[in-house]
Image (cartoon, rainbow, N blue to C red):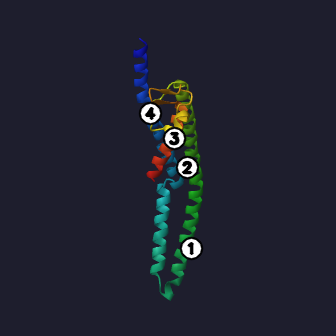
Amino acid sequence: MGQEETLAQHRSSSFAAPLILLLVLAFQFVSKWLDQLKKRGARSGKEIQLRREIKQLLKEASSFSQPSTFAQAAKLKRLATAKEKELANYQESHSKEIHMSYDLYLKVLRILKVVIYFVLICWFWRAPVAAISQQLVQPFGKFLSWWTGGQSKNNVMVGIIPWLILSTRVSKFVCGLFK
């Protein structure tokens, strides 16, 4: 009975490590994606229309190159400047709203991440998440087996906290590759 129980526990822990890694990787990708959306900002229809109008006014103003059409060109340039100010005001007000909404999403994601990490730590406390050959992790075996009971048959039992730390570092590296 004891051998069947340890075999079942080993099978569940062999699936736990990749699933935890994928979960941490998903959190990292969503966080990175939200950060990029926040930095880039969304362009609205009004903003696109104002940019188009500014380009058109400047294009028309540049077409008036004769001294007799100077007044018309100056008038069009003043209109373009007024539209640029309107665009700047719109972008400022709109960007504040966008930043507040993305900040809310990031806070919710951070809280969800903390809750899930806490649940994982409680679930796998003093239970190994994975077993890695002792030869592969020779100098770091004690760190990786923190609170899991050490080694078993030339394998190091990896604890949940070191696995979360390692998964987070790996996921940050992988997300950095996909800039």
- Identified at 48% across, 87% down, the residue is 66
* Residue underneath mark 4: 132
Residue 78 numbered mark, or none:
1
Q: Position of residue 162 (x, y in %)?
A: 54, 35
Q: Distance between the residues labelled 2 and 4?
A: 45 Å
Q: Nearer the viewer, mark 3 or mark 4?
A: 4
Q: Position of residue 119 (x, y in %)?
A: 54, 27
Disc 3 residue crowd, few under 14, some 14–19, many 20+, Cα 10 Å: some
**CB contact under 8 Å: marks 1 and 4:** no
Residue 131: image quadrant is top left
Mark found first going from the N terminus, 1 or 4: 1
Mark found first going from the N terminus, 1 or 3: 1
* Residue underneath mark 3: 168
Q: Nearer the viewer, residue 19 or 52?
A: 19
Residue 112 seen in the figure:
no
**CB contact under 8 Å: marks 1 and 2:** no
SS at circle 3: helix
Q: Which of marks 1 and 4 is in front?
A: 4
As drawn, 71 above or below 137: below
Q: Nearer the viewer, residue 178 or 50?
A: 178
* Residue underneath mark 2: 98
